[in-house]
Amino acid sequence: MMNYKAPRGTHDILGINALGMSFLELKAKEIFKKRGFEEVRTPIFEDAALFMRSIGNTTDIVEKEMYVFEDRKGRKLALRPEGTASLVRSFIENRMDILMPASKFFYTGEMFRYERPQAGRYRQFHQIGAEFFGNSSPAADAEIIILAQDLLSSIGINGVNIHINSLGCQKCRPLFRETLVKYFSSVQNLCTDCVRRLEKNPLRLLDCKIDSCKFTNAPQMLNYLCVSCKDNFNTVQTLLKSANCNYAVDGTLVRGLDYYTRIVFEIRSKDVGSQDALAAGGRYDNLVKELGGQDTPAVGFALGSQRVLLAAEKQGLFNSFKISEKIFVAIADQELFNEAFSFAVKIARNGLKDNKDISVFGPKNTESLTNQLKFADKIKASKVVVFTKNEFENGKLLVKNMRDRTQAECFIYEV
Ligand SMILES: [Zn+2]
Ligand SMILES: [Zn+2]
């Protein structure tokens, strides 16, 4: 027989991690609802051109990391590497840019990037994200940053570091771009990608995983912001402070996507690798128009669920997950199988008198009681309810406590 393995960079989410993933999604949905965000589920694959156009042809994601394939009719498709492009496509396609231009949406789901796998980084990974359309006010930026922080603290992750930066606008960024080109031209031994990026998209060099250490003295956008971008950046900071949100201005933050304008941010934790953010996002005022919609400002964020869960695990948050008590229903006499079965169904539906949070196993057919008890141990049942002929005739059961190995008789109606 062939032994099959999950493809490199993918993983099965099970046990406590599956519980953690569900818990995170549940908490996120509660918080999104309170802030008026509605859920959108987009396809896992889209026209590859959508991502090339929105994320940018010279970004690492598009150049190296996208899963692109042709379907049987030769259409060029891509597994989604992130959520924003799909959300914007959906926003425009469903004419929401005209019908409800001021609207808030969230999504949860799998994304795909061909990256080098490492702790908390997978080729198929889960993201939770939100997009706020039609509001150009700095209040929308602050709301999104606070929302991302609230989401992390809702599952117990505190002590995060929020980094913010402004990438400027179409007015002020060209001058910065020119200054960057001058600066990079003086740096020796750029990698081949950077040599090419220098012509097409000099901002991308700041993101280079090979060369970025050479750029410690690179010019920073913050020194080139126009008056209106400067005002915007200051107002966002004032609003964050007024909400007791601690942040640090970080002029080196550029993000690996082309569509950002003005505010970008990352939320990092020392509990995951230093390079990887738990959550990140920013403003993208031109993207809706560039993809064919009405001119609609927008700001959003996404968090990487696996990284968030990794941080949660390191902070010991999984220890607090309450696991239901396991009850095994056993039979000492085969002829009581039907009674034991209907009893198991009843307690699964209603719980026990003293505990509603239980998981019910059994009964098992055609096995000796000894084997049934061994099985109960194997699944770590805390209690075994045994149907025996003598007790049953008197309306009773045996309840074995598997922790201290004691047992007691009790009436069926008492359980
Ligand atoms: Zn500007
Ligand atoms: Zn480089």
Image: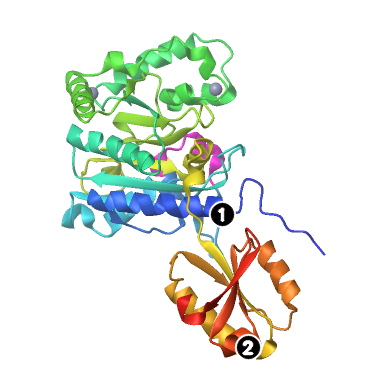
Residue 377 in sight from this viewpoint:
yes
Q: Is residue 143 left or right of residue 375?
A: left
- Most foreground residue, 261 or 341: 341
Name the residue: 51% across, 45% down: 319
Label 2 sits on a secondary structure element that is helix
Which residue is the site of mark 2?
A: 336
Residue 410, compared with residue 30, is above or below; it is below
Horizontal side, residue 200 vs residue 221: left or right: right
Query: Which quarter shows the N terminus?
Result: bottom right
Q: CA distance from mark 1 to mark 2?
A: 58 Å
Give the residues drawn in magenta, as a range.
53-66
Whole-percent x and y of residue 47?
44, 54
Up-down relation of residue 309 to residue 226 (above or below): below
The quadrant in which residue 161 appears is: top left
Q: Is residue 105 visible?
A: no
Q: Amino acid at mark 1?
A: Phe
The numbered disc on residue 369 is none
Residue 166 lies in the magenta-colored region = no
Where does the image place residue 397, in percent across and percent down from the top left? 57, 79
Amino acid type at image mark 2: Leu
* Magenta span contains residue 54: yes
Few, some or many residues within 10 Å of mark 1 (<14, 14–19, 20+): some
From the image, give the main secondary structure of the stretch colored magenta.
helix
